[in-house]
Amino acid sequence: MSIIQDWPEPIVRVQSLSESNLRAIPNRYVKPLSQRPNINSHNKHNPHTTTTIPIIDLGGLYTDDITLQAKTLDEISKACRESGFFQVVNHGMSTQLMDQAKATWKEFFHLPMELKNMHANSPKTYEGYGSRLGVEKGAILDWSDYYFLHYQPSSLKDYTKWPSLPLHCRDIIEDYCKEMVKLCESLMKILSRNLGLEEDMLQNAFGGKEESGGCLRVNYYPKCPQPELALGLSPHSDPGGLTILLPDEQVAALQVRGSDDAWITVELAPHAFIVNIGDQIQKMLSNSIYKSVEHRVIVNPANERLSLAFFYNPKGDVPIEPLKELETVDSPALYLSTTFDRYRQFIRTQGPRSKCQIEELKSPR
Ligand code: OGA
Ligand code: NI
């Protein structure tokens, strides 16, 4: 595996461009016509685009009411099979911690550029402050900056790669990620049970609790003077296992690809998390029982936006392949085996590219 050492072009912070009050965005952020968001026309004539993703109350799992428990499991099962995306409320994290996490990251992105640049990242590990995904020279870029860090496994956790300011931010990130791991571990059990598997099967296939990966990508989308030409994040499906997103409730910008291929703008419930299935789970639960669905982010001329994406991933070097328990004569394994470390190299070199990577892994028939 070739490891890329550096960016192909000098890095430009999108935030700096945004703050310089340009009227026109530079060409390298202008998407080709076919990829531009239809900012003004969405929702107008197409009733499908107004549907949002299901909202699931996780409180139902922790009552004595068996009927309610079963109904909640069922809702999760349906959401994983159909939309691949759902929102959860009563998820166990305090609204205070959610607000603190957003506030500390907002503060980070508003620190002076010299301080942020002390954490500048490279494509070698992507950890730190970054402004592009992919290393292709001359690529059309997305209108966002981000911060990426590892929380687990402990062998990858390195506080020196986390921001040192604002004060207490490391404590808040620590508390936030710890809760995220708890939520992911319980979702992994639910997903396993919902497929008729032993509760720990999915987690074991990920390489066990201690070795599974947990990383945080904080996306910062500055205001954009020409939102009809650009994207905050190009269409992609998440390469990992599960994603838990804490979005900005004030600015609707996440769009999910609906079954009719139209882009649906996600409307948010207050203090909800958005959960979505990543490619590794789609791949393991062969036959695509659970869907890793394509999504993208649009930008806004009047408001900046911040989101926290927590990725829960398999251990980097375990082969991930369709679970034998789910294969039948009628539905043989659909995908070839790969490790997550290898799989992740694709998005890290090519950048976000719809769903073409998982399609390439389809086993020859
Ligand atoms: C991601 C992602 C969506 C958002 O980070 O993979 O899809 O709303 N983010 O920022
Ligand atoms: Ni994503």
Image (cartoon, rainbow, N blue to C red):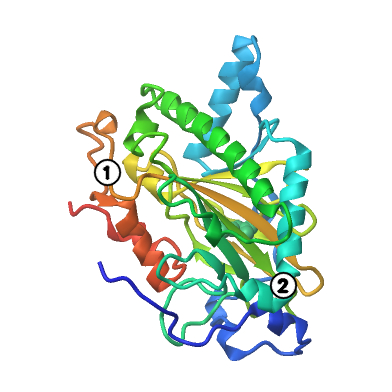
Q: Is residue 179 visible?
A: yes
Residue 48 lies, in percent from the top left, at: 65, 52
Q: Which mark is residue 208?
A: none
Mark nearer the viewer, 2 or 1: 2
Residue 114 lies, in percent from the top left, at: 67, 78
Q: Which residue is mark 2?
A: 222
Q: Is residue 285 visible?
A: no
Q: Which residue is mark 1?
A: 321
Crowd band around label 1 with a 10 angstrom C-alpha radius: few (<14), some (14–19), many (20+)? many
Q: Is residue 336 positioned above or below 178 on the image?
A: below
Crowd band around label 2 with a 10 angstrom C-alpha radius: few (<14), some (14–19), many (20+)? many
Residue 9 lies, in percent from the top left, at: 48, 87
Residue 200 lies, in percent from the top left, at: 39, 26
- Using the rendered view, name the quadrant where residue 93 is placed: top right
Position of the N terminus, as image quadrant, is bottom left
Q: Amino acid at mark 1?
A: Glu
Q: Is residue 69 positioned above or below 233 on the image?
A: above
Q: CA distance from mark 2 to mark 1?
A: 39 Å
Q: Amino acid at mark 2?
A: Pro
Helix, strand or loop for disc 1: loop
- Using the rendered view, name the quadrant where residue 27 is placed: bottom right
Q: Earlier in the sequence, mark 2 or mark 1?
A: 2
Choose between 328 and 149: the one closer to the eye: 149
Choose between 14 and 194: the one closer to the eye: 14
Q: Are marks 2 and 1 in contact (CB under 8 Å)?
A: no
- Using the rendered view, name the quadrant where residue 318 is placed: top left
Task: Give the residue displayed 36% in from the left and 39% down from the top.
Answer: 206
Task: Give the residue displayed 49% in from the left and 71% down from the top.
Answer: 133
Task: Give the residue displayed 27% in from the left and 28% down from the top.
Answer: 325
Helix, strand or loop for disc 2: loop
240 sits to left or right of 332 = right
